[in-house]
Image (tube, grey):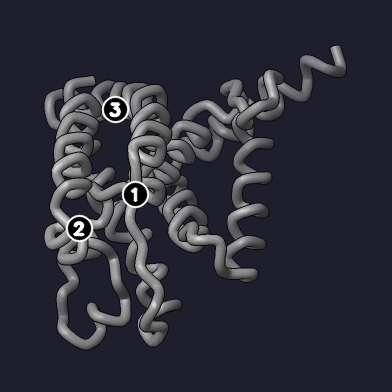
Amino acid sequence: MLMTYLIIGFTVLFSIGAFNNPELFLKCKHWPYAEARSGEYYRWLTSGFLHGDYMHLLFNMFTLYFFGRFVEHWFETQFAEIGRLIFLFFYLISIVAASISTYYKYRDVQHFASIGASGAVSAVLFASILIDPTVPLYIMFIPIPIPGFIFGIFYLWFSSREAKRGGGGIDHVAHFYGAVFGFLFLLLLKPVLMLSFFAQLAGWLGSFVS
């Protein structure tokens, strides 16, 4: 779980540092309009380590803490010593993938900008759902566990709807494509996961029939 802890530690330090450094914040946020005109594509990555406030940071790191350790452990069991490095690559490329999705949607919208690890955290979350689709998840303020695959369907529906509506100050496009990327990335690494995914769903559904 070392890599998950290192990612959380670096993100916390970088985010807090940017809270008190407006110039750094401005230089590192994901701003498609500026990127398309200045070629500052490094923002696709740096924006994933920025957050708007402590609650935004806490929510993302809390989610990453629980699901990042699980997914990192899976990488370690599948790829032995280099599993941690592959997990790190997966996390970083997920930030970029989520940023690219909003880049192409908003590159001509001057006022749009985005920050946060949510795209990559969504990728980690959906990777965990692929590995264990019946893992119990909770929606905020609803103290009832929801199977991961049902939560995932709702999450994609909600993110897609809000992305089409726009506004609200939340990058739902990054949430949606980050989640899809996380699911597909693991599936490309281990296609057999799809068989395991449906087998677990069948077992879960069968438990209600028997």
Report the side of 190 relative to 13 (left or right). Answer: right
Instruction: Looking at the image, tell me whether mark 1 or mark 2 is earlier in sequence order.
Output: 2
Q: Residues within 10 Å of mark 1 (few under 14, many from 20)?
A: some
Q: Which residue position holds label 2? A: 25
Instruction: Looking at the image, tell me whether mark 2 or mark 3 is earlier in sequence order.
Output: 2
Report helix, strand or loop for mark 1: loop
Residue type at mark 2 is Phe
Viewer-closest of 28 and 103: 28
Real-space CA distance between mark 2 and mark 3, rounded to the nearest whole angstrom: 29 Å
Q: Which residue position holds label 3? A: 72
Q: Residues within 10 Å of mark 2 (few under 14, many from 20)?
A: many
Q: Position of residue 88 (x, y in %)?
A: 20, 39
Q: Which residue is depicted at the point 71% across and 20% down? A: 144
Marks 2 & 3, CB-CB < 8 Å contact: no
Marks 1 & 2, CB-CB < 8 Å contact: no
Does 65 appear above or below 95?
above
Q: Which residue is depicted at the point 67% across and 54% down? A: 157
